[in-house]
Image (cartoon, coloured by chain):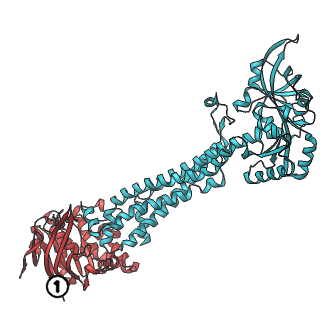
Chain colours: A cyan, B red
Amino acid sequence: MIKFLLKGLLRDRSRSLFPILMVSAGVFLTVFLYSYMRGILGDMVDVSARFDTGQVKIMTRAYKELADQLPNDLALLGVNDLLAQLKKNKPAMLWLPRIKFGGLLDIPDKKGESRSQGPVFGLGINLRDPDSPEIKLLNLKKSLVRGKLPENKDEILISEAFAEKLGVNIGETATLLGSTMYGSMAMYNFKIAGTVRFGMLIIDRSTIFADINDVRLALDMADGASEILGFTKDMVYDDASMIKVAREFNQKYSNQNDEFAPLMLSLGEQGGLRDILQMASTLGSIIVTIFIFVMSVVLWNAGLMNGIRRYGEIGVRLAMGEPKGDIYRSLILESVGIGIAGSLLGTAIGLVASYWLQYVGLDISKMLQKSNILIPSVIRARVTETSYYIGFLPGLFASVLGTMFAGIGVYKRQTSQLFKELEV
Amino acid sequence: MPLVKLEKVFKHFPIGGGNFTALKDINLGFEKGEFSGIIGPSGSGKTTLLNIIGSLDTPSEGSAVVLGEPVEKLTEKQAAKLRSKYMGFIFQTYNLLPVYTVYENVEFPLLILKMSEEEIRKKVLAALEWVHLTDKINSRPSQLSGGECQRVAVARAIVKQPELVLADEPTANLDAENSYHILDTMVNLNKELKTTFIFATHDDKVIRYLKRKVHLVDGKVVKDEVVSSQ
Ligand SMILES: Nc1ncnc2c1ncn2[C@@H]1O[C@H](COP(=O)(O)OP(=O)(O)OP(=O)(O)O)[C@@H](O)[C@H]1O
Ligand SMILES: [Mg+2]
């Protein structure tokens, strides 16, 4: 009997092929959408971590309150000491001091008079050391457009777009006009070693990267840093464990009454990233819920139409003396098979498409011209473990649920009534 | 004891606010080996009556004992078992399963009875022999003429050699020649296997073959005549 029913299923494409394609289309969309959203959210978090928040970040209490204004007068001091302790207590993590600063970048001509100038955002990092983890972290080598990475004192990197705007070339001098940690006027000559482009508009607009030691000199910040970022070596952010790291640190170092005491925040505790993280984790269930609902309705409908089309068959089977329960069961079994086949197919196609978007990427920089958010201008999907199964159960579930709903119509109907309907 | 015994059978259908009574006080018996028909104008209740005898429907009042089983008291499962073991159905519209071959269509009732493959093969070929369709074993219904389709349906109804065959307007879609062919086949079956046939029809070609005619008008039996010699 099973063989007999299977034969019918395979021969009747409107019962096998089309429902399979419908399920796989839905599953494909789920897998792809999920991977795509994961990619975007993951990139947002990842980029934020690398350029701004770290997985954890240490600032002074006071600095944190005004962080937007880059208040270096409130910066951390005694940084070397603190770093030594961090490396001792958490040797598995990278600890990177940075100075963020603002000011005016002035390009002098041969006579020393201003040729061009513009507001600048600067990042002082461990740049000169060829083994510095920052080089990899910020992907500096690959982002280099012209010139080379700084090797000598006072050499800096500048955004390619900024360099073009200022009309400055490799090897030329750029003067930073800013203020020292103590509020007096700072003026410091840097030398352009190379230009960079990251594909993120906010950073590509007007940024310089200098070695933190040069910046300390420039801004009179000996043994100081705006912030210290911490990263796990695998660069995978785990909210719970970073919250724990921060809590331990704060218990030891953070003093409620001292506004210059260091305070550690996890990535999730900074800015709007908490929401993004939460979104990433609830995303899956949202997509799946919507999918199950929509697909069930669609498949239910398809099942109904198919069921009506099959009243003839069902009526005959009933008349031949096949019990209703058996027929209902065989319909469900059919839908299980279709659900599995469709889910497998849809997952396979979804993964292929997601992997494609992960490795090739989609350039959306044209659409982002005026954007201020820190997101990469190339969209990449991210295939996670979840991508492999997120569509599978819903596909199966929707297929079976749709058939069950449709089948109830058959089940509830008086046998003779099914006949009437099939004779019309 | 008669094969089918109907006593004081009423059938009401709910329509709108009230009820429509399709069968009124039917008292009938059919013996084994009968070749009889329920005849009457359209809407007189023939199909409704046949459905009750076939345990596809239940009477609203009264009792219908078919093959010793009271139809109105059977569960869905028991009714299905009764049909699968003892009854064959033939419909006006053939109702063959389009994705299956002639052989597979005829085989189906035997699969429900879980017969062995060997036994099935023997019975299916014999049934197709009866209706002269052995050369179309592997055709699909869409490749057959209407007459051939109905012959497949007859083969399917008789393949398990049931006690009772119920045929609702079996010739309505057939021309004269095919109708007679089908009817001859059924008469032969009735003679050789003692299969009981009950028709529902208003087709003169069928009526001519019947040995007993139950006339139905507005859900009531108005005449029950036995044709003595034919
Ligand atoms: N499910 C139902 N609900 C309501 N009324 C019904 C139902 N089934 C049958 N009827 C009514 O019962 C009456 C008898 O119907 P039935 O199908 O038995 O007629 P019939 O004699 O077989 O007619 P025909 O020769 O046209 O097939 C009709 O008037 C029909 O409208
Ligand atoms: Mg009828």
**Image location (x, y in percent) of residue B98:** 33, 62
Give the residue type that dot 1 points to: Glu
Question: In the displayed structure, does residue A235 sit left or right of residue A364?
Answer: right
Q: In which quarter of the image is the C terminus of chain A?
A: bottom left
Question: In the displayed structure, does residue A353 sit left or right of residue B57?
Answer: right
Q: Classify residue A313 by image quadrant.
A: bottom left
**Image location (x, y in percent) of residue B103:** 34, 70
Camera-side residue: A169 or B205?
A169
In the rendered image, is residue A14 in sight?
no
**Image location (x, y in percent) of residue A198:** 74, 33
Residue under the image location 44 percent in, 70 percent down? A3
Q: In this view, does B112 lie above or below A254?
A: below
Question: In the displayed structure, does residue B217 sit left or right of residue B61?
Answer: left
**Image location (x, y in percent) of residue A234:** 79, 50
Q: In this view, does A409 lie above or below B208?
A: above
Look at the numbered disc 1 and say if its residue's Cβ is closer than 8 Å to ligand 1: no
> Is disc 1 surrounded by few (<14), some (14 to 19) or many (20+) residues within 10 Å?
few
